[in-house]
Amino acid sequence: MKHIVDAEQYLDAVCDIINSGEASVGIPVKGTSMLPFLNDGDTVMLSKADPPFTKGDILLFRRKNGQYVLHRVVSADKNGGYVLLGDAQRRNMAETVMPDRVAAKAVRAVRNGKTVSPDSVSWKFYAGVWCRIILLRQILLRIASAVNKLKLFRRLS
């Protein structure tokens, strides 16, 4: 028998486990806002989140409407908040989040069956370079999307 659990309830329970300080918890990535670093179906290992956070940290936070979102810190704001943005998003989609809305911090990811940690080259690239080229990355993502569509078209032909 399958049980369907509301995503917010599931993540509330995950956050309770994390905040007990006893464990890191893996959750599946859902959505495309963190492409190309994280794909739909990858796994992110989350741990307790204690500020201060640094540019490039990946945080699970809760929006005011209750929705949980996993995005990357691109800067700190002058009022003590953090500006978060998905890797595939435009600058105008950034959200400022106060530390009390941060539920957890990503400590590693499993992408295509391989574990990626914050000290890996790819994590450092997205935490460093990718956060600094927000305008340019939109062009790069459009090019990558066009190339993928062309590959799909060729396979279907």
Image (cartoon, grey):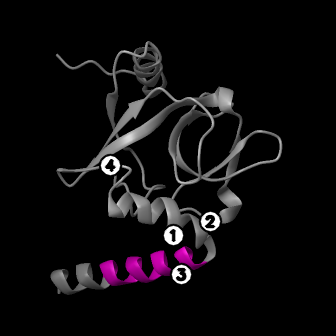
Cα distance in 3D space between marks 1 and 3: 15 Å
Mark 3 neighbour density, 10 Å: few (under 14) some (14–19) many (20 or more): few
> Residue 111's x, y, as percent?
26, 53
Q: Which residues are magenta?
A: 136-149
Cα distance in 3D space between marks 2 and 3: 10 Å
Q: Which quadrant of the rendered structure holds the N terminus?
A: top left
N-terminal of the two: label 1 or label 3? 1
Cα distance in 3D space between marks 1 and 2: 15 Å
Asked if residue 129 lies left or right of residue 153, the reply is right
The residue tagged 3 is: 139
Residue with the most extreme front position = 119
Q: Secondary structure at mark 1?
A: helix
What mark, if any, has residue 129 been given in the picture?
Answer: 1
The residue tagged 4 is: 117
N-terminal of the two: label 1 or label 4? 4
Asked if residue 39 lies left or right of residue 16, the reply is left
